Image (tube, rainbow, N blue to C red):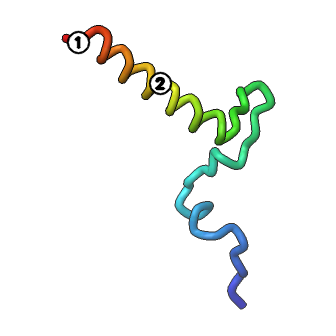
Amino acid sequence: MAKKNEGGFQSQAGLVRYFDTENDLAPKIGPKAVVGLAIGVSVLVILLQHFFPL
């Protein structure tokens, strides 16, 4: 009988799943912080354009 392959297509193609590895040294930022930072930077850019036009 044929051997059943449990690894899936990725292991056959030699692809590596980097997102499965967890690094304890990496900074962890929550999704709310990312959205808040994006909004904050956007407001800062708009204010700078308003007060210092080119």
Quadrant of the snapshot with the N terminus: bottom right
Residue 4 located left or right of residue 45: right
Q: How crowded is mark 1: few (under 14 residues within 10 Å), some or many (20 or more)?
A: few
Residue type, numbered disc 2: Val
Q: Going 57% across and 38% down the picture, which residue do you hit?
A: 35
Q: Which of marks 2 and 1 is in front?
A: 1
Q: How far apart are marks 2 and 1 (CA)?
A: 17 Å
In the rendered image, the residue lying farthest to the left is 54
Which x, y percent locates residue 36? 59, 33
Quadrant of the snapshot with the C terminus: top left
User: Circle 1 — which element?
Assistant: loop
Which x, y percent locates residue 20? 71, 49
Label 1 sits on residue: 53
Q: Nearer the viewer, residue 6 or 22?
A: 22
Which x, y percent locates residue 13? 53, 61
Residue type, numbered disc 1: Pro
Q: Which of 16 and 40 is in front in this view?
A: 40
Query: Where 5 sits versus 37, above or below?
Result: below
Q: Which of 14 and 33 is in front in this view?
A: 33
Label 2 sits on residue: 41
Q: Going 50% across and 32% down the picture, which residue do you hit?
A: 39
Q: Going 77% across and 25% down the picture, which residue do you hit?
A: 25
Which x, y percent locates residue 43? 44, 26
User: Circle 2 — which element?
Assistant: helix
